[in-house]
Amino acid sequence: MSKIAPGDVVLAFSRAHVVEQALVAAHRKGVPFRVVVVDGAPHNEGRAMLDSLLGAGVRCTYAHLHAVSYLMPEESKVLLGAASMHANGTLFSRAGSSLVAMAANEHGKPGARAPPTPPHPAHTSAPRPPTPSRTAAARRAQCSCAARRTSSPSACCSTRSASTSW
């Protein structure tokens, strides 16, 4: 990452794959810097990023979210990952990201948000199974009987035999 200068102290919140890659890439280029990984409950995902960064040889410190205002004066940059980005430019991230961003703003620290990417291999999970309400809605959408157009979903032929409760 070209924005990390020699001697920087970078605060990274939780685990974000793009932030992790940028920090490791800067370390591989030989830029001397230090990272403070700030973590928050309930998942404490920053521990995994801390292990990964330490394994790559990056100098790191670990702290919890409640200490962010205490740590902010020594930081030179703040990096936050984003979980999703919407068409209007709104970014969504992990709980606690706004607290870190507000503390950085209060202390006049420059910050960057990493754009969302496909999930990190360690964070992948099985596809979510359909819920009964989605399954019933799909059956109603495929039904061609006249009762489907009524306001009572139980009158439809495809839902009468279904075990889904309304």
Image: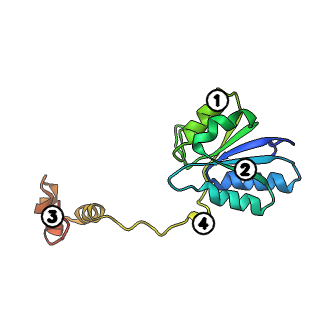
Q: Which residue is mark 1?
A: 105
Q: Which residue is mark 4?
A: 122
Q: Is residue 63 visible?
A: yes
**CB under 8 Å between callouts 1 and 4?**
no
Distance from Cα at disc 3 to Cα at disc 1: 59 Å
Q: Nearer the viewer, mark 2 or mark 1?
A: 2
Residue 61 tag number:
2
Q: Nearer the viewer, mark 4 or mark 3?
A: 4
**Residue 134 x/y as whole percent:** 30, 61
Category of crowding for the residue at label 2, using alpha-carbon neighbours closer than 10 angstroms: few (below 14), some (14–19), many (at least 20)? few
* Amino acid residing under circle 1: Asn
Question: Colour mode?
Answer: rainbow
Distance from Cα at disc 4 to Cα at disc 2: 22 Å
Residue at 71 percent across and 32 percent down: it is 109
Q: Which quarter of the rendering shows the C terminus?
A: bottom left
> In the structure shown, which secondary structural element does the residue marked by tag 1 occupy?
helix
Q: Is residue 146 visible?
A: no
* Amino acid residing under circle 4: Ala
Distance from Cα at disc 1 to Cα at disc 4: 32 Å
Q: Which residue is mark 3?
A: 145
The earlier-in-sequence mark between 2 and 3 is 2
The earlier-in-sequence mark between 1 and 4 is 1
> In the structure shown, which secondary structural element does the residue marked by tag 4 occupy?
helix
Q: Nearer the viewer, mark 2 or mark 3?
A: 2
> In the structure shown, which secondary structural element does the residue marked by tag 3 occupy?
loop
Question: In this image, 130 relative to 7: left or right?
Answer: left
* Amino acid residing under circle 3: Cys
